[in-house]
Image (cartoon, helix red, strand yellow):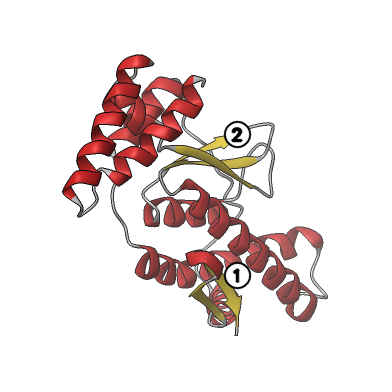
Amino acid sequence: MDHSKALEKIKKLLRLAASDNPHEAATAMRQARALMEKYRLEESDVQLAEVYECAARSGSKMTPPQWEANMVGAVSQAYACKVLFMTGIGEWRFIGEMAELASYTMTLLLRQVRQSRRDFISTQLKRCKTATKTKRADVFCSAWVSAVRKQVMAFAGNDEPSPATAAYMLKHHADTAKLDCRNRNANKGTGLRAMTDAMHGFIAAGDVRLNHGVNGQEQFALN
């Protein structure tokens, strides 16, 4: 048995050690301690083994738009994760005990906001220049994300990342740089057109619902 398999075995035993059956709990704890001693594993090693890295593909390989970063912030907070942007690869990396759920939620949200963005452009911005379409669609997406954020936070919660996640980051990602996001409307005012584009975003997000999916996993669905 290698270290990774030993860790999985120890985690299962520690879960059994929480059993209401005193005999079963004591036996499981004894076996877990024996394995930890045999493979020279500390409790911190077991805790770090509960932390995962899961990715969600970004729409940009170098500089993601601000609205996408805002969505990542909501998802990572909701699932108590740390998050990194992998420049060049173009993906968001969620890190924590619930990283798989975070990346799953983020992937579905991005799929839906991109579809809503395409619909908005094709119906409302047909006569606009390409650059104008992009900027106005960003306003739409920012409003969409703002509306959906409330659902994400209410459904998943907003606990802080665990000490194990912080230790994992220190061990595996100690050197990180601040991410610069792209805001194409940074110098634009909040005129009537921007307010109208934002209104379309809020309305489009009204069709998004977060429900319990198969095997307890969350999923977003358009109703």
Q: Is residue 193 above or below residue 62?
A: below
Nearer to the camera, 148 or 95: 95
18 displayed left or right of 3 = left
Q: Which residue is mark 2?
A: 86
Residue 16: image quadrant is top left
Residue at 67% across, 63% down: 111
For label 2, the SS is: strand
For label 1, the SS is: helix
The C terminus lies in which quarter of the figure?
Answer: bottom right
169 displayed left or right of 29 = right
Residue at 71% across, 60% down: 134
Three-letter amino acid code at the position of disc 1: Phe
Alpha carbon distance from label 1 to label 2:
26 Å
Nearer to the camera, 59 or 33: 33
Q: Residues within 10 Å of mark 1 (few under 14, many from 20)?
A: many
Tally of numbered tags? 2
Nearer to the camera, 189 or 14: 14
Q: Is residue 174 in view? A: no
Q: Position of residue 206 (x, y in %)?
A: 53, 82
Closer to the chain start, of discs 1 and 2, is 2
Q: Which residue is mark 1?
A: 140
Give the numbered dot on residue 3: none
Residue at 35% across, 30% down: 46
